[in-house]
Amino acid sequence: MSLQVEISLSRPGFTLEVAFDSPGGVTALFGRSGAGKSTIAGVLAGLVKPDRGRIIVDGQVLVDRSAGIFVPPHRRRIGSVFQDGRLFPHLSVRQNLLYGAWFARSQANGKPLRDIVELLGIGALLDRRPATLSGGEKQRVAIGRALLMGPRLLVLDEPLAALDQARKEEILPYLERLRDETRLPMVYVSHSRDEVVRLADRLVVIEAGRVVSSGPIAEVSSRFDPTSGTEPSAVLAVTVGTIDRAHGLATLEFAGGRLTVPAGRLVAGQRLRLQIRARDVAIATGRPEGLSILNILPATVLEMAAAGPTAMGLRLDCGGTILVAQITRLSAEALGLAPGRAVHALIKSVSFDRSGAE
């Protein structure tokens, strides 16, 4: 699936003018509240008409204002899920789902009800009404209804924003299963960096109605760009290796080496997305000894860039994997750092996905 978006619209006090594309997978629209993310989702779904521009999905023009083309929502084959689920309150869960299946009667890729029910773990909910469901359960049903419409693209507009952390942790594994097992292209709108890191393949950062950064999530996340609205970090695909239950630790293996982290509920062989923030990485020019830090990785300085009045950002090559670090300018000068310099990255702490498979 390919997606091309180039649109603009004006409203009192707000102007949206964005352009981005995606080859498929999960594309996250990320930014602060009010940046324009949900407006873009509405334009994709056909609920908002842009003043100018065009949208092309898999070669089909859905919107081209200069040519007078505007495909209505029911003919776009785009499934939408919103913050509140928008389930029919007078229908049971089964009837809500069957509405989606009815809508997809003419769609070749509509999936059987039983497959969607199993994928989302909602078999025990089928005879209940929406009013009796938790927030996480409602969102799973809403996703199921959208899937049963046989979409070629799924647009999820802040689907977890109204949920508390416990309910978010409940539903995120199902979104990961959806990503991995259906391979259905998704546009995922969120202002939560943790959600985006956990789910997205590509990141489009929106600020005040403009795209300020766009590309593969690992690349965009590692940029030291003060206009991007994101904290520089490395995003790694890792596999859980050994589990040391006696000390409550696990090893995570990746192309650049091995990391030790709290084991929690990790299991051997599990694949995860790992986020390492630049602020959590220290630099040494030689391998240090006598430290409590367990994660010390050999690396090479690739690039150096200003990261603030007193800070320096480093992009590091760690066995073919990009890491980032943020240190003071004084430290960079004292260590004699420059591109090509061999160093060791000391990772003080990590933020990682404790439950979902990649």
Image (cartoon, helix red, strand yellow):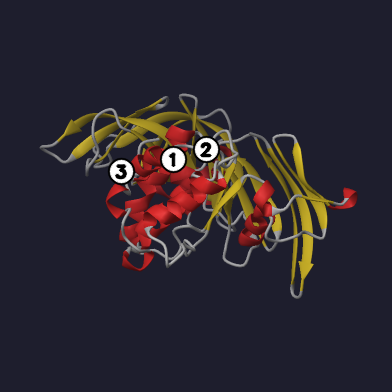
Extreme-right residue of the structure = 66
- State the separation of the CA atoms marked 1 and 2: 14 Å
- Badge 1: how crowded within 10 Å, few (<14), some, or many (20+)? some
Q: Amino acid at mark 1?
A: Leu
Q: Earlier in the sequence, mark 1 or mark 2?
A: 2
Q: Nearer the viewer, mark 2 or mark 3?
A: 2
Q: Nearer the viewer, residue 194 or 310?
A: 194
Q: Nearer the viewer, mark 1 or mark 2?
A: 2
Q: Are marks 2 and 3 in contact (CB under 8 Å)?
A: no
Identify the residue at horizontal 37%, vertical 63% (top origin).
135
Identify the residue at horizontal 38%, vertical 53% (top origin).
94
**Is residue 107 rendered to the left or right of residue 293?**
right
Relative vertical location of residue 356 with respect to residue 98 in this rendering, above or below: above
Does residue 225 appear anywhere in the picture? no
Q: Which residue position is annotated with label 2?
A: 110
Which percent across, then down, holds residue 211? 69, 52
Identify the residue at horizontal 79%, vertical 67% (top origin).
10
- Badge 3: how crowded within 10 Å, few (<14), some, or many (20+)? some
Residue 239: which numbered mark, if any? Answer: none
Q: Which residue position is annotated with label 3?
A: 355
